[in-house]
Image (cartoon, helix red, strand yellow):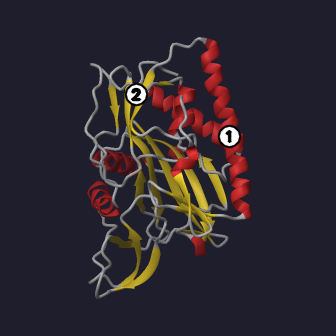
Amino acid sequence: MNERIWFSDFKYKNRGLLVKKTGAHIPFAWKTLHDVFSWFAFYFFAQSWRIGRRISGYKRPTIAFFPDKPRPWYFIWPVMHVAGAKIISDTSKADIVFQFDDATVTHNAIPITRPGAVLVNFECNDISKSLIADVFARAAGYDLGVDPTSYTGAMVEKSELNGAHDGRIIVGPMNAPIADKNYQKLIDNEIPGGLVEDLRTCIVGGEPTIVYRKRRLLERRFMNENEEVILDRIDKVFSTEELDIIRRFAAGINLDWGGVDVLRDKASGKIHIVDANKTDMGPPIALPIGGKLRATRRMAKGFANAFSHKKM
């Protein structure tokens, strides 16, 4: 893979890095340096997988990305190397063609592809919070979204945009909702220890494949700063009926590959899908290196089975 200069993806702003594509802001802190070191340790293993596939002479399926190419911090990057895929630039010659675009709403026409090529995520063109709430309600049979002008009680106000991490709790009803904001029920996902737990579920071929228990401080519930991350078994975390909800949701937004954020309400025990991402980053920095490697291998097996004639 010919890497472009990664620094061009970022811009210094407000004592941190601004991700140009999504608008996400990463503040500078000592913890950031630790996170960078942890990421490079995993990057080393991913590179070794990549080199190992080349040395072995494994006949690799080819994959092309359009309109952008993933950087190494996106989960698809290590997964495709473990699965043995080879990146090429020409979509007309690739076995797999993957729409890779961080934008919340995309309008990318399908490029020229060869007969029989597998297309990934080309029908997943909208991951706005309002659509997520609507599709979830149809998949689950109960609501997440609320009308902020009539809803009484605590609710979450968040940007429609992907990766903003700007959620805040407000009390409804309110007179004037803010444009480009979405309003959802506040899901009580608190666990012992003053933490909240998100169940980050990764999708391959529309199928829930792995799940992380991402735990963060209650007062920082909307920040992407995990105190602990545990890789768990998908069938241990979710019931058969809940897995069907996740499958129906993925089908509803045409998500072939990506991640969904699932919250379990403490009182009712019901799950709620509150976010989706078709260019999932990962594995999470706070996950120990052994968990990162297991998660990547499981996703690589799912990738090969779903998108490639090569099985693992």
Looking at marks 2 and 1 on the same chain, the residue that comes earlier in the sequence is marked by: 1
Q: Residue at x 69, y 51 (%)?
A: 36
- Image position, residue 285 (x, y; %): 65, 51
Q: Residues within 10 Å of mark 1 (few under 14, many from 20)?
A: many
Tag 2: amino acid: Phe
Q: Residues within 10 Å of mark 2 (few under 14, many from 20)?
A: many
Q: Looking at the image, is 1 positioned above or below residue 196? A: above
**Numbered marks: total:** 2
Which quadrant of the figure has residue 45?
A: top right
Which residue position holds label 2? Answer: 307
Which quadrant of the figure has residue 26?
A: bottom right
- Image position, residue 238 (x, y; %): 48, 51
Q: Residue at x 30, y 80 (%)?
A: 177
Tag 1: amino acid: Phe
Disc 1 is placed on an element classified as: helix
Q: Looking at the image, is 153 positioned above or below residue 77? A: below
Res 294 visible:
yes
Q: Residue at x 33, y 31 (%)?
A: 119
Which residue position holds label 1? Answer: 42
Along the viewing direction, whichever of 55 and 12 lies nearer the viewer: 12
- Image position, residue 46 (x, y; %): 64, 33
Q: Looking at the image, is 159 positioned above or below residue 20? A: below
